[in-house]
Amino acid sequence: MLGFDDDGTRPVLALEDLSRAEWPPPWTDERVVDVLDALAAISATTPPTYLGRQGSFVGPNWSDISGDPEPFLALGLCSPSWLEASLPTLIDFTNNAPLAGDSLVHMDIRSDNLCFRNDRATAA
């Protein structure tokens, strides 16, 4: 652990320095395997009891984005055609993601939140 601060509103925990990490793209098959290995290791970790359980998906409300996609598209993260093709899957996932169980889950794995350091994938 590099540091921790809790201002009573937004706690921050710094676990490692990622300033020398590599941030994709490009994505390679090897990097995808590294991410899958990291997710398996996270899932195999016994969660600390103080974390509690997450009862529902926490993330973008894809149904709202579907109704008004322009603010999301203005971020430049994807093309309008990608969003249109992907929204049904994203909405289905949001509504049906299985969250019951005893596994530790990161809940914020995105391609822009992953980097590679010392031959391993790390979520920022």
Image: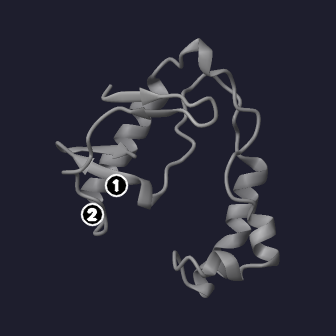
Q: Residue at x 32, y 25 (%)?
A: 1
Q: Which residue is at the front of the view, 16 or 90? A: 16
Give x and y (percent) for residue 64: 80, 68
Q: Are marks 1 and 2 in contact (CB under 8 Å)?
A: yes
CA neighbours of label 1 inside 10 A, class few (<14), some (14 to 19), many (20+): few
Q: Amino acid at mark 1?
A: Val
- Relative depth, front residue between 107 and 84: 107
Q: Quadrant of residue 31?
A: bottom left
> Could you tell me residue 9's position as x and y percent?
64, 35
Read off the residue under disc 1: 32
For label 2, the SS is loop
The answer to whether 21 appears left or right of 64 in the picture is left
Residue 28 position (above or below residue 80): above
Q: Please indicate whether residue 43 sits to the left or right of residue 24 in the image.
A: right
The residue that mark 2 highlights is: 28
Which percent across, then down, holds residue 2? 30, 29
Q: Residue at x 59, y 37 (%)?
A: 10
In the figure, is residue 32 to the left or right of 97? Answer: left
Amino acid at the residue labelled 2: Thr
Expressed as whole percent of the image width and height from the top left, the position of residue 40 reads: 42, 34
Relative to 56, is 49 above or below?
Answer: above
Determine the residue positioned at 70% across, 55% down. Answer: 93
